[in-house]
């Protein structure tokens, strides 16, 4: 790879700078060549020398003959470049338009460009393409391509000189010379200035103007004899109007006295050309559209004295002189554009292409795309915060062991629906019943003592016995209450949400041991786990829906009651809890049922809904 880079760096040089000499050599080769094939081979070599190209290839069809020529120079052989350039030539010929591709070596500062230019001449039945390699370290590939286009056009224009002597004023040799002088220009303004002044001298015109067509409008590039074009002068407005009149008609237009022209054109009256002629003192004026294929890319207008009318043959001569340069005008214009101008032109061309007749499918797609973009930019959609949620009781009654005792029986488990007063479980009360019997016996003894004291006239002993009797009654009440507490009853109508003592029967329960949790039937709330990014959008009073995993087809309306201020860790992430009331709970909702709550926040712009999560993540990650 290092050897190849060295070879390429020594083989590729900067292009030479001798346009006048190049065009003179092309004309000389055309006059001296014995055949068109031989001329094209020699011209390819001269073109490669002028562009300082180590390898160039021409592939074309000349009538029924196939032309396949290549030239190379420098220390590297043709096989060093052949595979790259021929592959590039094959791809570019399929596109049918000038193309440049810049290549860079991985381990060196070498940069080369492969350039392609179509080679075509309808008059000579010549069709094909030319590709070559040039150095691109200091010169922009676009400038090189524009230069190659003009030089190739000069080579193609000179094909008609092969095998024929030099002709007179209206022959082909002056046409090629005019083309050579114009092609030597380095910018669009210089090229237009060369064309207008060359045609003025050749045709003996008073004035020649050239304008470029852009989006059905004409911009005047050059007027012979003027270094600068006054854009806003009345005279420029007349010339521009005549050019655009010719552009709309798509054919040559002349305004002069009815002489020197075969046909009906002079007898027709073109309003804008007549205005130009009147402002020019009655001189003859002519506008010719310059086309590339079916597209008009430029308009050429000229003015001559009225005593030297314009003939139809001269219109053909002007076309032969200038139409080969129309591709060069396009390439030079594109190469000199800045990035902003290029973007504006591309957008305007797309609009113009869209407005062309027919192509309804493309127009429909564009309209739909614009409508969608407008909806995204200006439309709104309902914004909902989706968060996990589960059903929890609004109020829970906790039942615990009233005192230490042995669990005798369990009558309910979690999930049972109970009524107020239903016995849920029982503690062993046999010891309490024995204590109750003992206290009752003691109470009977005290009552007998009180009666005997009263009968024997001992009031003090009677009062003491009465007091002891009352103390025993209090103890009896305590025991009776404890006996009643051995039956753990449901405090309200509801559902047992926690508690299963079936495996604890016979165990000693300490005082305060949790036994059951009972929730009222009508008291269900929704516990919503709002993510951190959405907590700012939640507020009391918002409504939404809750869809349980058990019955996803039956959503329930909910209302947000409150949003708790502190965060909690649930499932390994921070969440903010919110409480919601279920508007119409039914039997399908059970405590602990999980699902998704969707809280309706309100309308938001479509673009915000599509981008706010990404924008927030970027702001957090990159401090935007």
Image (cartoon, rainbow, N blue to C red):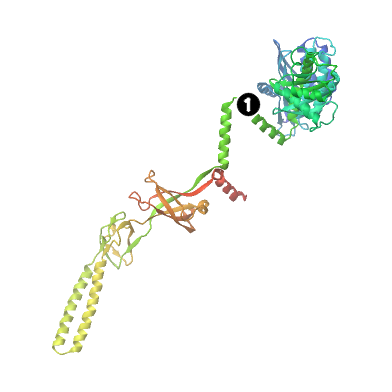
Q: Is residue 6 visible?
A: no
Left or right, residue 90 beside residue 320: left
Residue 241 versus residue 497: which sits nearer the camera?
241
Q: Residue at x 67, y 30 (%)?
A: 349
Residue at image mark 1: 356
Mark 1 Cα shell of 10 Å, populated few (<14), some (14-19), many (≥20): few
Asked if residue 45 is positioned above or below residue 500 in the image, the reply reads above
Residue that extends furthest to the bottom in the rendered view of this protein:
457
**Quadrant where the image shows the N terminus:** top right
Is residue 227 shown left or right of residue 388?
A: right
Q: Is residue 438 left or right of residue 103?
A: left
- Residue 119 appears in the rendering: yes
* Residue 533 % position (x, y): 52, 51
Residue name at image x 30 percent, y 62 percent? 491
For this view, does 305 lie left or right of residue 217? Answer: right
Q: Position of residue 29 (x, y in %)?
A: 82, 15
Residue 90 vs residue 341, the one in the foreground:
341
Q: Residue 136 lies in what quarter of the image?
A: top right
* Image position, residue 108 (x, y; %): 73, 34
In percent of width and height, residue 57 lies at 73, 19
Tell which residue pokes out farthest to the left in this image: 455
Q: Residue 139 lies in what quarter of the image?
A: top right
Q: How many marks?
A: 1
- Pick the front one: 154 or 312: 312
User: Which residue is found at the position 39% from the left and 44% from the top?
Assistant: 552
Label 1 element class: loop
């Amino acid at each position: 790879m290092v050897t190849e880079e060295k070879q390429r760096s020594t083989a590729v040089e900067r292009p030479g700078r001798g346009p006048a000499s190049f065009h003179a050599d092309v004309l000389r080769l055309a006059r001296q060549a014995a055949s068109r094939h031989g001329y094209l081979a020699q011209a390819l070599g001269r073109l490669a020398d002028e562009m300082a190209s180590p390898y160039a290839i021409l592939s074309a069809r000349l009538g029924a003959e196939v032309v396949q020529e290549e030239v190379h120079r420098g220390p590297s052989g043709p096989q060093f470049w052949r595979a790259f350039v021929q592959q590039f030539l094959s791809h570019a010929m399929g596109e049918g338009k000038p193309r440049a591709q810049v290549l860079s070596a991985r381990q060196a500062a070498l940069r080369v460009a492969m350039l392609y230019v179509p080679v075509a001449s309808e008059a000579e039945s010549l069709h094909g393409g030319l590709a070559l390699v040039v150095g691109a370290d200091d010169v922009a590939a676009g400038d090189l391509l524009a230069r190659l286009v003009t030089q190739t056009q000069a080579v193609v224009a000179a094909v008609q000189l092969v095998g024929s002597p030099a002709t007179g004023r209206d022959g082909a040799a002056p046409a090629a010379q005019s083309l050579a002088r114009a092609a030597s220009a380095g910018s669009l303004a210089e090229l237009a200035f060369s064309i207008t002044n060359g045609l003025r001298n050749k045709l003996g015109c008073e004035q020649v103007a050239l304008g470029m067509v852009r989006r059905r409008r004409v911009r005047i590039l050059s007027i012979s004899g003027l270094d600068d074009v006054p854009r806003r002068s009345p005279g420029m407005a007349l010339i521009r109007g005549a050019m655009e009149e010719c552009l709309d008609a798509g054919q040559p237009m002349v305004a002069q006295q009815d002489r020197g022209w075969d046909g009906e054109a002079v007898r027709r009256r073109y309003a804008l050309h007549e205005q130009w002629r009147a402002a020019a003192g009655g001189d003859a004026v002519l506008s010719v559209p310059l086309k590339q294929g079916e597209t008009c890319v430029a308009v050429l207008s000229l003015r001559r004295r009225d005593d030297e009318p314009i003939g139809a043959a001269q219109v053909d001569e002007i076309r032969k002189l200038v139409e080969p340069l129309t591709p060069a005008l396009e390439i030079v214009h594109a190469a000199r554009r800045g990035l902003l101008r290029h973007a504006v032109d591309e957008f305007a061309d797309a609009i113009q292409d869209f407005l062309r007749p027919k192509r309804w499918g493309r127009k429909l797609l564009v309209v739909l795309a614009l409508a969608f973009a407008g909806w995204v930019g200006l439309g709104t959609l309902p914004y909902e915060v989706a968060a996990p949620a589960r059903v929890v009781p609004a109020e829970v009654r906790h039942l615990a062991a009233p005192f230490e005792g042995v669990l005798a029986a369990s009558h309910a488990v979690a999930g049972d629906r109970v009524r107020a007063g239903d016995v849920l479980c029982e503690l062993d009360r046999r010891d309490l019943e024995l204590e109750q019997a003992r206290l009752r016996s003691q109470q009977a003894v005290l009552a007998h003592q009180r009666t005997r004291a009263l009968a024997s006239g001992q009031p003090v002993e009677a009062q003491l016995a009465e007091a002891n009797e009352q103390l025993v009654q209090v103890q009896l009440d305590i025991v009776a209450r404890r006996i009643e507490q051995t039956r753990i009853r449901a405090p309200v109508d509801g559902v047992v949400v926690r508690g299963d003592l079936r495996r604890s029967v016979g165990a000693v329960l300490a005082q305060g041991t949790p036994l059951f949790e009972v929730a009222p039937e009508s008291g269900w709330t929704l516990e919503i786990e709002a993510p951190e990014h959405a907590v700012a959008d939640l507020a009391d009073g918002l409504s939404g829906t809750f869809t349980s995993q058990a019955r996803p087809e039956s959503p329930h309306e909910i209302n947000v009651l409150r949003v708790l201020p502190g965060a909690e860790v649930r499932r390994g992430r921070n969440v903010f809890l919110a409480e919601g009331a279920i508007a119409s709970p039914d039997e399908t909702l059970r405590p602990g049922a999980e699902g998704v709550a969707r809280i309706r926040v309100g309308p938001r712009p479509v673009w915000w809904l599509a981008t706010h999560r990404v924008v927030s993540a970027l702001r957090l990650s990159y401090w935007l």
